[in-house]
Image: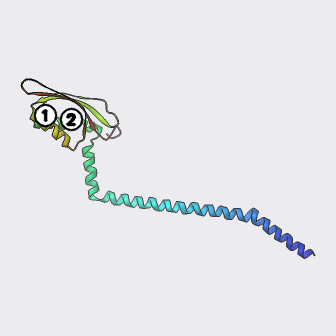
Amino acid sequence: MKRSNIGLLLLAVSVVGWFLAIRPQIKKFSENALQVSVKNIETTSYEQRVKDLDAIKSSPDFQATLDARYSAMPKSSQIPEVLVMIESIGSQAGVTFSSATIGSPNPSDVPVSLSFSGDLAAVQRFLDTMNNNVRTVIVKSQNYSSDSTGTITANLQVGLVYQGKGAK
């Protein structure tokens, strides 16, 4: 009788031990294995992204595109150069500037007021060239008037798109 009681007692201890000690450890191991699997997939994804970025970065087409973007969107310190470029475009088109005023930069652009005059063809050439220029200029408002001689006076409020305040 004693042996069967000892056997039943050992069986009961084994079952209780299974549920109290081993089963929670198996559950914890399963959760950890799942987390490791997720982290491995995430790591593989990040490694692929780095490889893709390195491939893009070393591409000559990418570098040319990036250079063109930086040229089209000047740094805040290059805004005076953009104004000189606008003056040169106006001079080549045949318009005469009477004033140019720079406002305080905001996150998206630098506001500029331009006043100039010229005949219809000169004003049209200037506006077309500004519109097709690599440096992005957003016309926010425009007013035109003309006198009896056919001279058009224009007042433009434009925004010079730039790389933002952080870029010097």
Mark earlier in primary sequence (1, 2): 2
List the single residue furthest toward the left: 149
List the single residue furthest toward the right: 1
Query: From the image, which quarter does the C terminus lie in?
Result: top left
Check disc 1: other Cα within 10 Å, few if <14, some if 14-19, many if 20+. many
Question: Relative to residue 55, is residue 120 depicted above or below?
Answer: above
| Cα–Cα span, label 1 and label 2 | 17 Å
Query: From the image, which quarter does the N terminus lie in?
Result: bottom right
Mark 2, residue position: 83
Quarter of the image where one finds residue 127: top left
Taking depth in this image into account, of 17 and 124 the one nearest to the observer is: 124
Please name the residue shown 26% across and 57% down the image.
61
- At label 1, the amino acid type is Val
Mark 1 residue element: helix
**Could one spot residue 97 in this view of the protein?**
no
Mark 1, residue position: 123
